[in-house]
Amino acid sequence: PFLMQQSIHRIRIPLRRYPHLILSSYYNCHHSQQHPLLQRKMESSATAKPKISTSAAKEFVKRFNEAYATKHEEFENQFWGTKMALASTKSVTYSSDNLFQTKKDMEDLLSNPEVLEEAKTHRFKLSALLDDNTNSSGCQKTDDLVKTLDIIIRTCQCNDMSSSSEAKSIREETSKIESELEMARNSMKLGYIAPDDTNDEPSGGDVFVPASSVALRNMVRTSAVESRRRAAYDGLRSIGPFVCDNGFVDIVKLRNRLARKLGFIDYYDYTVTNAEGFGKEKLFEILDDLELSTRPLMEEGRKELVKRYGESALEPWNTSFMMAGSVIKKMDPYFPFSKSVERYVKSYSALNITYADSTMTLDLLDRQNKYSNGFCHWPVPAWVKPDGTFVPSKTNFTSLANPTAIGSGLTALTTLMHEAGHAAHFANIRQPSPLFSQERAPTSVAYAENQSMFLDSLVGDAAWRAKYALDLEGKPIPFDIIEEEIRATQPFAVFALRGMLAVSYFEKALYELPEEEMTSERIQSLADEIEQKIQGGLSPRPLLSVPHLVSDEASCYYQGYTVRNLIVYLPCVVVTFLHIVDVRSNGIFLFKSLFKERQ
């Protein structure tokens, strides 16, 4: 049904009602001077303008870039240490207080009204110089300077608190509670009550078995014993009351107060506007259309599930297993985690994807107190200094493998391919400021997820599996297993998309709640209501167990994953590449068209 086509960097993407999303996101990242928040009338003269020196602007940009790079690195080191539950050393102490302080230091720079005004002043003066020197040999350097001032202005506007005397203190109070909650969540006593019909522990009493949320989700997907699946699901459900009773309610209230002090509808509107360049209303025009058009597929899928496996298949602890649990067990020998890094490296190398001398730290195994979601961050963003020196990125990314658990190898490899895609994307950005290669606003969420999710989709590709899904003896996965997995899951593929939509609709409803209704009980019941409405029943992954909701940098973020599906799996993208696996030109295309051309 897609009728409209647009061309972005030579990818032809049918967008129907979605061109404003992709194009706005694209221009938001790459052509910040054209963003609506930056549009302003530049005074000009019909006569030739006097020469204006760029030295002051260059000095300002140099000082800003260096200050930002330092503060960004200090914050990201604390972010990594606290998320990974690393032990403090003599030179650095990881704590919620230090995480809060380094984040505050970075945001103080970006929210400083004097920095914003100085950048605007230099940008205004340089507009005249840019007009005068259109045909001069120094035009490119002037263009780079203007472009850098524009991204500084746009980033500072995203962090500007000057319109309200209370906004800054609200933001700082929120950040402190967020840091404390995330540390509490990491150290939460999480697990499941071993049912009597298992051999986990001696029977005869309620025995608590510690397990991370990753392990619990894996049990829900793969355990052949229903009582174990239900116990794991109940363990996941326990996360919601914990976060609500340990600060999340206050965080939601404070986020909304901040957004409204700054003139936005609510926090969701504030976040989306900063990241994508348009508000919540426009976003949900898109998501509402997607929700309505995929609802019949979801309803048909649920009916098919009942037809195949009975009514009990709709229980949230049964759905995932009924769809593919037995097939995952058959696939497991062909996805040993011990080979994951090797296969990721070989696959990327065959696609000619490189890392531009980046230094990468990988933390790939699930363990106690470690943050329960994969992510990729950059203590040192890639950028180009004024003298032309390229600063390679330093990247931290994580996966959550349990090599002894069935299905964990496949899940961990998919996460690895995804986060490694983020790392490759941002490592190859060559711009005159680190602001161009960091993941926070004004970087578009939809844009940032495009490349990584295209690359993690390779793991589900039959051709990729035929070459890379090998057992420890080097034997490839049999095609009949690939076929069985496709037949088992394809009728229910829409469930994953609906699960992503549910997160966005929950956050929308959450931030639209009147403040007097924001209680732990109401938020938990709202999560169940949204699961029923969007997914047709309670979700195998309870909404309040999704870690993005709690994190400042990931809240109101999930629409990025949803929008990515509109691009990654469109037929035109497949036709553009024709053959995906191990085609070096595809990697070159990604490098030139999506990574490097940000310069």
Image: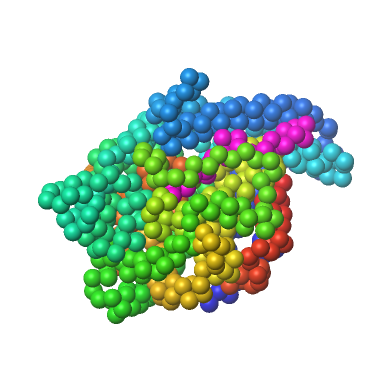
Quarter of the image where one finds residue 439? top right
Near-viewer residue (211 or 23): 211
Based on the picture, tell me whether residue 529 belongs to the magenta stretch. Answer: no
Task: Single out the residue that lies furthest toward the bottom.
Answer: 307
Colouring mode (rainbow / by chain / secondary structure / one colour) = rainbow
Q: Is residue 462 above or below residue 378?
A: below
Based on the picture, tell me whether residue 394 belongs to the magenta stretch. Answer: yes
- Residue 286 shows in the view: yes
Q: Is residue 139 left or right of residue 90?
A: right
> Who's the residue at 82% across and 41% down the image?
139
> Who's the residue at 42% across and 67% down the image?
330
Residue 272 placement (x, y as % from top left): 48, 49
> Who's the residue at 39% across and 42% down the image?
367
Residue 533 placement (x, y as % from top left): 30, 65
Residue 550 placement (x, y as % from top left): 37, 43
Q: Is residue 332 above or below residue 271?
A: below
> Who's the residue at 80% across and 42% down the image?
140
Q: How many marks?
A: 0
- Residue 444 shows in the view: no
Residue 507 placement (x, y as % from top left): 36, 52
The span picked out in magenta is 376-401
Q: Is residue 171 left or right of residue 576?
A: left
The prevailing secondary structure element of the residues shown in magenta is: strand
Q: Is residue 337 left or right of residue 423?
A: left
